[in-house]
């Protein structure tokens, strides 16, 4: 397989950006796959801030982290990612290396709880503010569910308008798949 699949490519981008000791954000921890991936990469000296609005997601992520011995350097935050700036330690303000969001609903759970355009954009805006130079925000945009198309349009509109002097934005996806395949938007902070 030459062309990386969506989730593999999202992880490749993150891997290239972060180093042990870094502070990073999982904007939608869900079942904790990305949180565990990030916690592994930043190691004991680093820190992961992981958000979700569902108690179930927080407990699933907690379990996954405990299983892999990754709980000590992760903050699990039961709140909207839109409030991210309220939770960062002083030493991590303006020193975040990367953030990842998987938009949509929690697989195997309540499909009516989905990420929303206003909350997602507010969160990305706040994270860009606190991201260090060379840092990266990766959004995996799932949009096949009710409300997904509106969120997709809003986020595409928002990232397209980011000033190219300060940010470059990548749009990565397979364009000949049936239905509504997910795609990646990755924002790199240049200055
Ligand atoms: C596609 S799932 C995330 C999957 C996850 N990355 C994983 O590895 O399993 C999307 C998650 O976003 C959460 N969510 C929805 N709105 C949110 C918000 N405003 N802030 C934080 N999380 C939110 C949902 O509860 C759901 O768990």
Image (spheres, grey):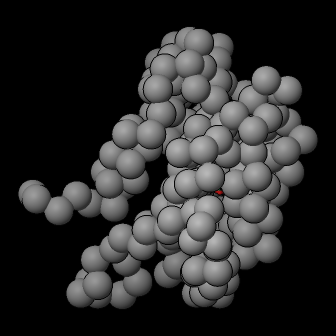
Residue 167 lies in quadrant: bottom right
Rendered residue at 64%/41% (across/down): 132
* In the rendered image, the vertical position of residue 137 relative to residue 120, given as above or below: above
Q: Position of residue 150 (x, y in %)?
A: 65, 87
Rendered residue at 40%/53% (across/down): 10
Residue 164 lies in quadrant: bottom right
For ligand 1, the image quadrant comes to bottom right
* In the rendered image, the vertical position of residue 50 relative to residue 157, given as above or below: above
User: For this rendering, which residue is in front, 133 or 98?
Assistant: 133
Q: Position of residue 136 (x, y in %)?
A: 54, 50
Residue 159 lies in quadrant: bottom right
Rendered residue at 38%/48% (across/down): 13
User: For this rendering, which residue is in front, 4 or 158?
Assistant: 158
Is there any visible trace of residue 20 in the rendered image? Answer: yes
Q: Position of residue 123 (x, y in %)?
A: 76, 58
* Residue 89 falls left or right of residue 26: right
Q: Position of residue 162 (x, y in %)?
A: 64, 73
Rendered residue at 58%/26% (across/down): 22
* In the rendered image, the vertical position of residue 154 relative to residue 130, given as above or below: below
User: For this rendering, which residue is in front, 1 or 69?
Assistant: 1
Is there any visible trace of residue 183 in the rendered image? Answer: no
């Amino acid at each position: 397989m030459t062309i990386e699949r969506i989730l593999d490519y999202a992880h490749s981008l993150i891997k290239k950006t972060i180093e042990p000791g870094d502070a990073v954000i999982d904007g939608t921890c869900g079942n904790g796959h990305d949180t565990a991936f990030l916690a592994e990469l930043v190691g004991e000296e680093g820190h992961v801030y992981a958000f979700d609005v569902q108690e179930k997601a927080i407990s699933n992520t907690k379990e996954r982290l405990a299983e892999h011995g990754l709980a000590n350097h992760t903050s699990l935050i039961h709140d909207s990612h839109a409030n991210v700036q309220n939770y960062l330690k002083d030493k991590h303000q303006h020193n975040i290396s990367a953030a990842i969001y998987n938009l949509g609903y929690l697989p195997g759970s309540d499909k009516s709880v989905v990420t929303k355009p206003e909350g997602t954009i507010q969160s990305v805006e706040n994270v860009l503010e606190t991201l260090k130079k060379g840092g990266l925000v990766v959004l995996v945009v799932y949009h096949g569910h009710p409300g997904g198309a509106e969120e997709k349009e809003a986020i595409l509109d928002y990232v397209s308008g980011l000033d190219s002097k300060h940010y470059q934005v990548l749009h990565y996806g397979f364009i000949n798949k049936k239905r509504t395949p997910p795609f990646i938007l990755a924002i790199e902070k240049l200055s």
